[in-house]
Image: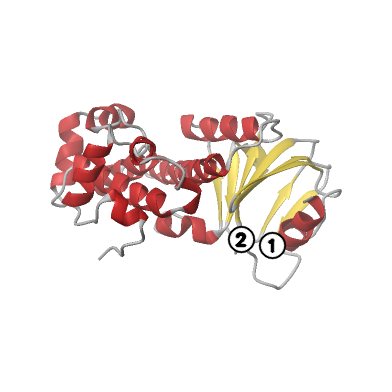
Amino acid sequence: MANDLSTKLLRPHLGAGAQKTGLVAVRSFRSVILTRHVTPIAPWEWGGALPAPLTHHAFVIAADGEGVPFGDTARAAVFLTANARVTIPWRRHADVIVGWIPPTALAEFADVAPEDATPIDDSLLVRGLTSFATTLVPGSLDPSSIGRYAIERLLVEMAFATLLDQNSARTPDRAPASLLERSRALLLAHRSEREYGTTQLARELHVSVRQVQRAFADVGTTPGDVLRRNRVDLAVELLRHPDYRPLPIEEIAAHAGFNNSLQMRRALQAEGMPSPSRLRAGEPVH
């Protein structure tokens, strides 16, 4: 795996292989790859080595809490797009985790994905992402195919939420649409949690339930409607994914954030979707 990774990721993006980037561990969760490094005291030249198109975005996370050097300061993390041209000047042996995310995995989040490099300040979201990634690599447990799928989705959604939170934090005086954007992001990130709803959303945003409801009313919808659609999208994805075929419909409903299969069936019907069994059988969605 290290040799393949060196060819496919490290050399094209950083211009160096496993040894020169201090690679110590690799974990793969479907399309998302996590690598852990003890960096040499030498710069990482992101994207400057080869003219060929680069294939992945990356989150560079300081697992040791000492920060990632960016400009004149150290940041909690740095997000690098596939097209970025950035130098990370390591001046110490740092414990670093890099989350490699293909652009297609963030395609649904294209509106918030930056075009170059984004330094990430300390926040609860970036701490959660760091803690989760640190737990995963190196790891002694080998997840099932269902587990790998779930971890992949969690990593992508946590990365998206972290980016959106960072963008919002840098422009606190934006128009009211920023509340709507942050709300949509959180509803997407928490869609698999059955207990999550408008009250929990407002609490996480530090605003009143009425403020959240008003933001959605301005665009002709409600937080509950958006959350239901998010859960329906997840349910459709799970019902059609071959790794989830062994699971009964009731468990699919739980994984998609519904209280039971009847609630999932009604949500699908409300969105004009086929029944769970027909979706699993491959009936197209119109």
Q: Which residue is mark 1?
A: 47
Q: Is residue 114 visible?
A: no
How many numbered markers are drawn? 2
Residue occupying image coordinates x 80% and y 36%? 92
Task: Give residue 204's quadrant in the image.
Answer: top left
Q: CA distance from mark 1 to mark 2?
A: 6 Å
Determine contact: label 1, label 2, CB under 8 Å. Answer: yes
Give the residue type at disc 1. Answer: Gly
The percent coordinates of residue 81 (x first, y second) are 57, 58
Front residue of 266 and 23: 266
Q: Is residue 179 visible?
A: yes
Above or below 20: residue 104: below
Above or below 196: residue 185: below
The numbered mark at residue 230 is: none
Residue occupying image coordinates x 16% and y 52%? 219
How many neighbours does mark 1 have within 10 angstroms: few (below 14), some (14-19), or many (20 or more)?
A: many
Which residue in the rendered view is the most extreme toward the right? Answer: 19
- Element type where label 1 sits in the image: loop
Give the residue type at disc 2. Answer: Ala
The numbered mark at residue 84 is: 2
How many neighbours does mark 2 have within 10 angstroms: few (below 14), some (14-19), or many (20 or more)?
A: some
Q: Quadrant of the C terminus?
A: bottom left
Task: Give residue 256's quadrant in the image.
Answer: top left
The percent coordinates of residue 65 (x first, y second) are 65, 29
Residue occupying image coordinates x 54% and y 35%? 129
Residue occupying image coordinates x 29% and y 48%? 232
Front residue of 39 and 197: 197
**Upstream in sequence: badge 1 or badge 2:** 1
